[in-house]
Image: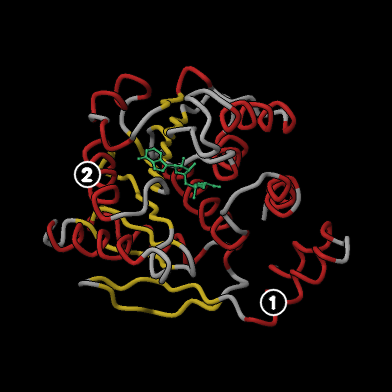
Amino acid sequence: MDAAIRKFIFHDLQTIEGYIDPPDALVFLAILRHQALAGFEGAVAEIGVYYGRSYFLFRRICGDRQPIVAIDLFDIDGATKGGAQYLQFVENGRRLGLPVLEDLVIKGDSTLLKPADIFAKAGAVRFFSIDGGHMLHHVMSDTHLAADTLTDHGIIAFDDTFNPTWPEVTVGVADFLREQQGAFAVFCITKYKTYVCRRAFHAEYSSAIAASPDLAAFEHVETEFLGSKAARLENPMRRRLVHQLLVRSGMGVFSERAYR
Ligand SMILES: C[S@@+](CC[C@H](N)C(=O)[O-])C[C@H]1O[C@@H](n2cnc3c(N)ncnc32)[C@H](O)[C@@H]1O
């Protein structure tokens, strides 16, 4: 286990307003570590940056030389483009010592982007996180952008799958998988996210998830999803409660121990 990155996940990242929680941060870590070990090259891209919680996780894990494309409308607070949300995002990076790679930021509607826009910024993508608009047309458009810019060995992480608040996200992922007729396969499912790769890499990513020391704390439950077997990572209620108690009682520095 990488103590410094785990400290970052359980402490520093929690200071950024946003949505990736420690279990998915650990899955991101396991996948990115495997890609680095396997020599899988390519950029990282994220649709739906918000204030950068998962973006700064990418920055921390991947280091300064990896291109990370950040796509968002940056108008969440109703301000004009480049307004308060963007300024807070940049300020968060300055505070964490992980400055935003501003040349690789795309401010605008992801559904209007073409693969060439991503290639021009960073080349092909090995890890594409989709967490932007949550209606079916957004998910379909973002998924095709991801699939069309993905390296052979790349993965797509979909946020808010199986969340009853956003049912069309799940429909979009299922539509994509069926439309692709088995070319893409799900290898991991968490409470909030679904992870997909090309079928030829399914066994490899499944092994990486099974073997990751950072994911050993979770129960790995084999789950069938549209023609592939995925590891569903179960996070017992007891652990979540202990983690929350430690964070709320000001002992957040110890909260990482709940996930060993
Ligand atoms: C749930 S937040 C993302 C959370 C973020 N991934 C994190 O780790 O905290 C969704 C973001 O998607 C952005 N968004 C929504 N629709 C979009 C679109 N069509 N194009 C680009 N970004 C969009 C919003 O501005 C918002 O910042």
Q: Amino acid at mark 2?
A: His
Q: Quadrant of residue 62?
A: top right
Q: Secondary structure at mark 2?
A: helix
Q: Residue at x 51, y 52 (%)?
A: 28
Q: In this picture, is 117 found above or below 15?
A: above
Determine the image quadrant of residue 89. Answer: top right
For mark 2, does the 10 Å Cα neighbourhood hold few (<14), some (14 to 19), or many (20 or more) residues?
A: some
The relative height of residue 107 versus residue 5 in the rendered view (above or below) is: above
Q: Is residue 150 left or right of residue 222?
A: left
Q: Residue at x 36, y 21 (%)?
A: 121
Task: Using the image, determine if residue 65 lies above or below residue 214.
Answer: above
Which mark is first along the chain, 1 or 2? 2
Say which of 46 and 152 sits in front.
46
Q: Residues within 10 Å of mark 1 (few under 14, many from 20)?
A: some
Decide if residue 238 is on the left or right side of residue 67.
Answer: right
Q: Would you say 175 lies left or right of 259 here?
A: left
Q: Where is residue 253 drawn, in percent x and y?
A: 83, 56
Mark 1 = which residue?
239
Quadrant of the snapshot with the N terminus: bottom right
Q: Which residue is mark 2?
A: 144
Q: Judge depth for marks 2 and 1 and give the one in front.
A: 2
Residue drawn at (58%, 75%), measured in percent from left and top?
235
Q: Spatial distance from mark 2 to mark 1, Cα to Cα?
A: 37 Å
Name the amino acid type tagged 1: Arg
Residue 118 is situated, as x and y percent measured from the top left of the image, at 32, 27
Element type at marker 1?
Answer: helix
Image quadrant where residue 240 sits: bottom right
Residue 116, given in percent of the width and then of the height, sits at 24, 24
Q: Is mark 2 within 8 Å of ligand 1?
A: no
Ligand 1 lies in quarter = top left
* Left or right relative to 204: residue 220: right
